[in-house]
Structure formats: structure tokens, C-alpha cells
Amino acid sequence: MPQGFETESRKLLVRLRDVMASGEAGQARLNEIVRLIANSMRAEVCSIYLFRDADTLELCATEGLQQEAVHQTRMRLGEGLVGRVAKTRRVVNTADAPAARGFRYMPETGEERYSSFCGIPVQRIGETMGVLVVQSRVSREFTADEVYALEVVAMVLAEMNELGAFAGEGAAMRTRHQEPVMFKGLVGQEGAAGGNVYLHEPRVVVTNVVADDPDVELARLREAVDTLRISVDEMLTQAKTVNKDQKQVLEAYRMFANSRGWMKRMEADIAQGLSAEAAVEKEQSLARTRMQSADSYLRDRLHDLDDLSNRLLRILTGQGSNTGAEVPVNPVLVARNIGPGELLDYGKKIKGIVLEEGSVGSHAAIIARAWAIPLVIQATGITAEALNGDPILVDGDQGIAHLRPDDTVLAAFRDKMAMQTEAQARYAGIRGLPAQTKCGTVIGLHMNAGLMADLPSLESSGAEGVGLFRTELQFLIRSQMPKRAELSALYAQVMDAANGKRVTFRTLDIGSDKVLPYMKLNDEPNPAMGWRAIRVGLEKPGVLRMQLQALIRAANGRPLTVMFPFVAQLEEFRSARAEFDKAMAREGILGHPLPSAVEIGAMLETPSLAFAPDIFFKEVDFISIGGNDLKQFFFAADRENERVRRRYDTLNVSFLSFLEQLIARCHAHNTPVSFCGEDAGRPVEAVAFAAMGLRNLSMRPASIGPVKHMLRRLNLDDVRTVIHEARERGDQSVRSAINDFLRQQI
Ligand code: PEP
Ligand code: MG
């Protein structure tokens, strides 16, 4: 790049910074900026367009076009060349604008005289805020150096806009992060919650975009990158316990951290006048733009680069991932995504959760559900818009989050919350009553749990017992393997808290998305169908044995119920049971009191077990249907992949028929059977399961009231008729038939 050009560009940035520092109003600033850029670029026209809403751009300032057009000329996303730049987030650089694809003539601007056009997206870490345009009479393409300089300017404009430098009259010049915004995502967990944003990964705020001394900035960048490299290398050497995926990510980190190309681009940005952190952010922004159109492999890699950029920004600004931001009252967690371990770390203080990504089948979602925390997933853009402490309402029933809600939304929401409280009161009123249908069938309602903190719900929900105690949650919240004595004390506490009610302890279900940082699992292409749960327990029985011992000791002469997860065939159940018998024998020899009664069950989570030999149904003391996993294998649809998961309804006729046949088999052998997947807690599904013959359901505590309320109002014979007719008609799912029926009934 020519030296003189660079100096010119730096001068321009310094002038822009002065404008930023001036006490002027937003409009005056913009006017000054377009004048400065036009002069510096020797272009007759410079204009800035900003979004007034998600689909409309507005001309906010211009040097060279008709002033009357300012705030009048608007175009939709994708419309005209400016709209195209905004939509594609790519530069349009043409010598003959009227001949360019998509050109749209705006007569009020008087732009017909200008032939060359160069439009640059004004964007900040993946979010497009507007378009910067320069035009000139002579027909020429802007040079690569000029385009590059304009990109740097656009980046500075984006940062200025983010910091509120252009606040003024009208929607396009609104102050950012202050307006109400609604995010329409998907339902992760029903319920309503109001509170204040608590960002899982607070954004780094860059306030010094333009720097005076490029040498100082270069030195800062190099030092920060060195620190970054060392920390990535450290992560890799400490990474003995990570699986292949995590290792791949770290390798990618290392590759980027050592990438000459990345470094060179940032150095060039600094030479143009950006500060080190602004240079990092500029490259991060570009990577995010590329991410939108990349294939999934490349997207993952760009994701890695994004994470790495964040790390670098934290090093440069000294803002740690823990920014010291106080937890606001009624915190609503806002994050791109979150793992089950991280969510457990936050604990129940969280009032609501909104995720940009996330899936209903993930274990983080299950935990949110278990804790009855309203959860909205797939809320695109929320992490860029929300600031720590912003008021937010989470409408889990509709999958909507209202950020900085206005008074009308707030009032409507309060009504909704009041209704929810009213419903709670109704459920509390039937807490002591059985879930007895109108036809006299009694359904046992149990709750799912996993932590000591869940146990008080046993009393408040009216559950008959704990139908599924997910023991892995205890392992997930620790940084090292718990000791046998700790586990035994904990299980004893759980049994004490249950006060004689039955607790079904499921042995460790590790693998798939439940990864323990301290336990090495195999590198597997498809962990959900890989070495997980009882497969790990039988092949490496150390932890299973310890757990069984801890359970027997915890029972201390009381009855004990244990079930094994993910049993796919008879032999696995037999081997697992043999482990239990051995543990009993050992404990007996050691003189520990043995449980007064023992029940050993299996979770049915793979279709294969439904077709096991009859003898399995005789040997097993009970079966618990794990619908979450069973459904994913029945339909071959990953429970964590929202795209495919949502195609297949639980009330799909094939799935219901499968359940019906399985339940009939259990009844024929007098094998107690229950259902403990998430669907058991959904009233309509629960009714269908009861109609198919299930007499015991285990669900999150908050579902017990609604499910019981529904069951008590129905006659299961009627529901069976509805299902039968829907089947006869060849309906794919019985959902709409049941819903119609419920509407008439209730
Ligand atoms: C299930 O698969 O339905 C189940 C209850 O187990 P988890 O959700 O913990 O895999
Ligand atoms: Mg499961």
C-alpha cells in the first residue's frame, strides 16, 4: 500500500475521532463525517444510510446528493445497490452504477450524474447497521486500497454508532440498545418470567477505535497475540482429558493464533489508523459475515476464530470473561448457547433463559425444564442486542423474549404472570388428590430430579416419588470425580429427604452431550449412538461399582431402587444386574446393612429392547421408558438437532402404536412400566400415554399439577376412541384430533 495513502487514511481516522469527541448532536456529526470522507477520498459524493427497522434503510447524511433527500430516501433490504450491499454484506464497487445489477434510480437524490459507486457495509461483529457509499462522476472502479480504507472507515462508523454517537431524531438515528426489541425464537420450556439480562459472555466494549501511534498498537497487538498463543498451547497441553472434538477446536485455535494471514490483516488495519482492539474486531466482523454463507465445516472453523478473537479482545482490553458485572436482581441468562455443566453452575437463581442457539433435547434444556425455568431457544441476534441489566420478559409458552419491553407489553405480561399464579393455585388445590380419570383409572405421577435442591419439590408438587434421579448431574457439577463416601452421603440425604417415598436412582448416564471434564471418553463421530451410559459402566466398571456401593450404603437397610440407563439388549441388563449382585455380596461381607428390598430396572431407550426375549420382561423388576432417547432412535432424528427433531411428533401414530405394543408386552408379563422422558410432563402427551396403557409417568415437578388437572377431567375410553379413529383415517399424528377433542371437552 502506498505510504502516502496510509498517512491520508490515518489522518481521516483521527479527524473522525475528533468528530466523535466533539459535543455535537448526532446529525451534525454525520454531516461532518460525510464531508470529511468525501474530501479525503476525493469523491464528489459520500452518503451514510442507516437501518430504521430490520428491513428499511434510510439516507441519514450526504455530501453531494440533494440535501432534501436526507431522511426521505428509503429502500428496503435488497433493494437497489445500497440495499444489495446491506443484504449481502458485501462491497459493491462499480464504474457504471446505472448498468449494475439491481440499480434503482432515486430521483430525489439527483444521483443520476454519478457513474461510479462504491458501497461498503457498516457492520459490527456480524450485525449490519447500514451502508457507507461514495460516488463520483468519472466512470472508474475504486482501487483495492481505496476500498480497504473505506472498510476501515466503515468499521469506525459502526463502533461510533454502537457507542451512540449518531443518536438523534427519527428511527434510523435512535440510540442503540435502548428501544424495545422482540425476539421470536422457539419454545424450550414453557412459563413466563420477568427480570434483567445477565449475559453469559459479556461483550467486550472497545472505546478506543482510532489510535495515534501505529507502532504502539502493533506492539500491543503482538504482545497480546503472544499471550494468546501461550494460553492456547497451555490449553492443549492440559487437554489430556478432552475428546477429539474439543481437541480439534483447540488445534484450530492454535492454527489461527499462528496464522500469518490473520496477523497480517490486523497489522494492515493498524497501519490504517485503527487501534489494536479495533483491528481484531474488524477481522472478527468479516469472519462473522463469512460465517453466514459458509458450509458447516467452515462455519465451525469461523466459529473458532470468533472465539479466539474474543479471547484476544479480552487480553487487549483487560476485560475478563468475568467482567465483575453484578448479577442483577431476577437474572435472565442470555447466551449464544450453554452446556448442562455451566447451567448447573449458575443454579436456580436464574429466572429465565434466552439462547441464540440451543435445542429442546439438550441436557441444558432438560435442566431448565427440571427447574421450571422458562427457556426460549433460537432467539437470533439477542446476544448482540442485549446489555447486562436490560429488562427482559421471557414468554416460554410462545418462544418469545421481549427485551426492554414497553408499558403495553409489560402490562400484558403481568396479566399472563397473574394467570400463571392463578393456575398454580389451582394445581396446589389438587395436590393431595390422586390423578384419577373420570373413568376411574389412577395414574401414578412421579417427578424427575438430579440434585439435592430438587427434593423439596417432592412435597410441593405432590409427586408420589422420584421416578428418575439422574445421578450424572452430581458428576457434572464437579471439577473432579466425586468420592464414594461423598456420593453415599448425598444419596442418603436424598433418601432422607424423600422420607419413605420411592426414589429411582439411575446409574451414571454419561456420554452423548453429557461430558465430564475429568473423564476421558473415546473420540467418536456420533456420541449419541456411541460409548455412553451402561456401555461405559460395563466396559470400565470402576465408577459403576463405586456408585452401586454408595447406593447400597446410603440405603442403610432401607428399600433401594436402581435402574440402568440405555440398556439395548438382555445381556447388558444381566451383566449390570450381576454387578449389583456382586456389590451386594461385597457389602454384606464387609458388614454393611443391606437394603430391606431391592428393585432393579432398565431404561428402555432403544427400540431394540422392546423386542427383547420374553425372559427379559420376567427378569427385570421394572422398565422405565426414556422417551427422549427412544424417540431420537425411533425416528432417526437427533434430539439436539432442531431442524430434524421438530419434524417428528411424539403423537405420531407409529410412535404411539409402538408404545402401545410395548406396554401390552409389559402388562402380559406383569412388568411394571413407566415413562420418564420429557413428554410425560406435557399434558396432551400424558393423556395419550395413559390412553395407550401407561399407569405411571415421571416428569419435572412443575408438570405434575397441569398433567393431573388434565387427567382428572377426562375419560380415557374417549381418548382411546379419538386415537383409534385418527389411526383409521391414516392421520400422521393424533395431535390435532386430541386437541379438537379436548377443546370440546374442556
Ligand atoms: C430419556 O432419554 O428419555 C431420559 C430420560 O434420559 P436422558 O434425557 O437423561 O437422556
Ligand atoms: Mg436418555
Image (spheres, rainbow, N blue to C red):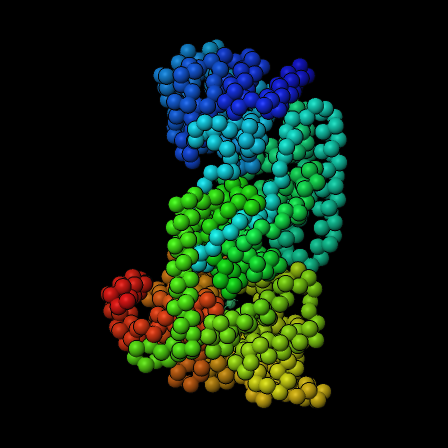
- Nearer the observer, 504 or 423: 423
Image: 603 above or below 61: below
Residue 531 visible to the viewer: no
Image: 611 above or below 398: below
Quadrant where the image shows the C terminus: bottom left
**407 sits to left or right of 321:** left
Q: What's the residue at 56%, 13% (across, down)? A: 39
Q: What's the residue at 57%, 45% (across, down)? A: 388
Quadrant where the image shows the N terminus: top right
Q: What's the residue at 42%, 35% (across, down)? A: 54
Image location (x, y in percent) of residue 445: 44, 75
Image location (x, y in percent) of residue 451: 58, 68
Q: What's the residue at 74%, 26% (across, down)? A: 215
- Nearer the observer, 414 or 590: 414
How many numbered marks appear?
A: 0
**419 sits to left or right of 367:** left
Image location (x, y in percent) of residue 293: 49, 39
Q: Quadrant of residue 425?
A: bottom left
Q: Quadrant of residue 713?
A: bottom left
- Nearer the observer, 369 or 331: 331
- Nearer the observer, 647 or 342: 342
Residue 57 visible to the viewer: yes
Image location (x, y in percent) of residue 442: 37, 80
